[in-house]
Image (cartoon, helix red, strand yellow):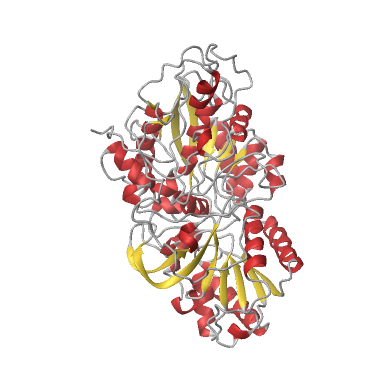
Amino acid sequence: MQPAQAEGGSSSNNLKKWGPIGAIVLVVAAVVGLIVVSGGDDGNSSTTEPTTPATDPVTTDAPADTTPGETAPESTDAPPAGGDIVYPLSFSQAEAQGIDVAWDDRCDTTTGQLAIQWFFAPECYAPFAGDNGGATTRGVTADTIKVVQYQGPDNDPIINYLSDAVAVDDTNAESEQTARDMLGMFDQFYETYGRKIELETYVSTGLANDEVTARADAVRIAEDFEPFVVLGGPALTSAFADELAAREVMCIGCTPGQPPQWYADRDPYVWGLAISAAQARTHDREFIAKQLVGGNAEYAGDPAFTTQPRKFGHVYISSSPESQTIADTFVAGMKQDGADVAEVLPYTLDPGTLPSQASQIIAKLKSSGVTTVVLASDGIAPRDFTNEATTQEYFPEWVIVAPALSDLTAFGRTYDQTQWAHAFGVTHGAAPVTPEVAGYYGLYQWFMGKEAPAKDTIGLLMPNYTLLAAMLQATGPDLTPQTWRDALFAYAGTKQAISQPYLTWGDKGYWPETDYNGVDDATVIWWDPAATGPDEIRKEGTGMWTFVDGGKRYLPGEWPSDSKLFDPDGAVTLYAEPPPGEAPPSYPSPAG
């Protein structure tokens, strides 16, 4: 995922329990579709029961022919053309091998995708019949797959501080019900080889950065629940994921962003959806080198800066020993590209000291003559930084990099608008689409025939589930962490689009190291303080992030040298309808 950064939503228990990890995912989920389904009782543990489907933007199993230049993973023991089915068998594999499959009504045979109302719907997999191997690994039986959802405490002061910025009214009960409803969709449409997801929840007593409690939680979950996988984790420490991996328990979205080798050392147990911290900096460095280095600070708020060559200062959140390593590597790269970097300043997400930290940091930036602040932050800190900058009469360019919530309109509206009118940068989220017609919000309505109980945070809740379910299909009946990983690495990638990031894992050639995180591409945004419209949780207001070139996305090495920052020509704040070619197919609602 992204660097250890915080995020939240206001009085919502949902946002509190997911913390920064959730917020990072929310950035993705707003434009990256994932699917979840579950039925069952109201208890903390139940096997999912068939229900009806849902929708959203982040797919982990799109047909191979939808991703340019890539093909679907092929089974290593695939039969000769026309042979018997060897599971897992995707629609495209069956077509290529000439295998006759009795596809059921879950599959749209005209597209080869599941018949759910979602443009990013996964590929169909052959309906299973036979012996699934029973208890193939910890947490797996012939009938169930044990999944534990981690939840942070409702009274975490760090997450509460983050949640003050935006108002979200979803409750824990609404969040759980939404997840179980969506699990019902997975159960009804996805092929899980005779097994159902058995969902349990675990509520921690530790704070988002409490390493001791995080490790204790991981031990208890591993020993008491014995799950196949854990979803989520404490937002500001890697101790939880580290302990689970040591006990050979898989987890998804369970840690702040870590260096590539950290994930490799814990293979196949720790996985992310958002781009990693190091990968995000690769995009940031290329953007800065091609569009900012060597030019004047023309977008600054201080007229004196606009005619001066850019002098950079890097401000970053420090949440783990890796934070400084990542920042130092990034700054060294900027200098190698010719950037004049005068200051490198860390901060910690401490509600009690953040205002004083902001005062000291702004004073140093101003004293050093920094014209361009490169800010790698959570969603809350820019509020303190921008307020303090105005107090000290300091008006630089604000360049966001590796953002975690600071690239969301909902949070941008809480910053000093005189300052933020000069903000721009790189986001790994995608240009948003009206939620009623796309994404998880619309998918749930299609599946259930009503609005989701957790209507504001459904996009934050579902991505980890969707990645899990999509790869359960692709893994087949022999389910273990190793076979799940092999299926994910073989997966060609999601569809490349405007309304969602592009996700791949493994060795696809985009990164020098094996990729244990999802998002690979990025786009450019600038803040328009006069734009009006809904934010990511559908609240109307003034001030919006604006996407350059309609949200055109770039992979590493593809960034252009010409800048279109603050150019309204072709820019987009929100798509009222999905971009051309990205509208979902239309199917009758399972809810009738």
Position in image of residue 579 (x %, y %): 40, 51
Residue shown at 39% from the left, 57% from the top:
536
Residue shown at 73% from the left, 60% from the top:
329
Q: Does residue 525 appear left or right of residue 402 in this picture?
A: left
Position in image of residue 398 (x %, y %): 56, 73
- Farthest bottom residue? 304
Between 128 and 502, the one lying in front of the other is: 502
* Residue 541 falls in image quadrant: bottom left
Image quadrant occupied by the C terminus: top left
Query: Is there any visible trace of residue 31 in the rendered image?
Result: yes
Query: Is there any visible trace of residue 153 in the rendered image?
Result: no
Residue shown at 41% from the left, 46% from the top:
582
* Residue 165 falls in image quadrant: bottom left
* Residue 179 falls in image quadrant: top left
Residue shown at 33% from the left, 61% from the top:
539
Position in image of residue 147 (x %, y %): 49, 33
